[in-house]
Image: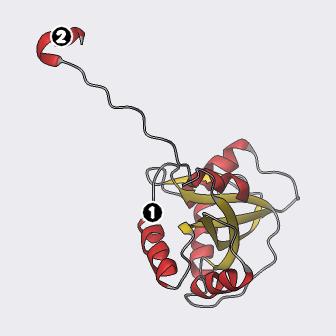
Amino acid sequence: MSNQAYFLSLRGSPALSQFRLDKLYASVKSSAPSIKHVYAEFVHFSFSQAELNQPEQDTLSQILTYGPTGQTESPTGALFLVIPRIGTISPWASRATDIAKNCGLKTLLRLERGVAYYVTTKDNQPLSTSEKATLISAIHDRMTETVVASLQDAEKLYHHADPKPLSTVDLLQGGKVA
């Protein structure tokens, strides 16, 4: 199998209810007063052995249409994309990939999901470094997630490397030096 994976990103439904958005805004407004509006939506990432044809993309789109429907917005402002930590596979990805393969998407290697936060400011100026830090700490769990600045950065989620050759260390003969 080739190490190359074909990457596709697909917009999803809104990720947070208005209640949760209000709660997020309340938690950051004192440290990030220039934030005017936050919109969050799911983004799905597909990695496959071959480019998905239109019927396969339609099937994938149907699989990834789930949950309550909310008011979808046209994304504007600075993007803060929360994805699983690079080098890990989320439990969501394991199940979603299995479901997609069972629906006939045989070339699919992995599906993953992130949350795209779009932030606009009151004066249309970029957030300050401290405001960014406040927002980032409020929107992700640093133990299990990473925040990146573009959708293309999510390609790093699927990294396939050839295993390194096995090596052994003789602790009985070499001791601490080994």
Give me the disc on residue 174: 2
What x and y, as percent, mark residue 71?
A: 71, 87
Image position of 96 with respect to 125: above or below: below
Q: Nearer the viewer, residue 11 or 73?
A: 11
Q: Quadrant of residue 43?
A: bottom right
Q: Quadrant of residue 83?
A: bottom right
Q: Which callout, 2 or 1, points at the residue further toward the start of the chain? A: 1
Q: Which residue is mark 1?
A: 90
Marks 2 and 1 sit apart, C-alpha to C-alpha, by 40 Å
Image position of 62 with respect to 105: above or below: below
Image position of 8 with respect to 137: above or below: below
What x and y, as percent, mark residue 162?
A: 48, 41
The quadrant of the image that shows the N terminus is bottom right
Would you say 8 lies left or right of 138 here?
A: right
Look at 42% across and 34% down and name the residue there.
164
The quadrant of the image that shows the C terminus is top left
Would you say 153 lies left or right of 100 here?
A: right
What x and y, as percent, mark residue 140?
A: 53, 58
Q: Nearer the viewer, residue 4 or 67?
A: 4
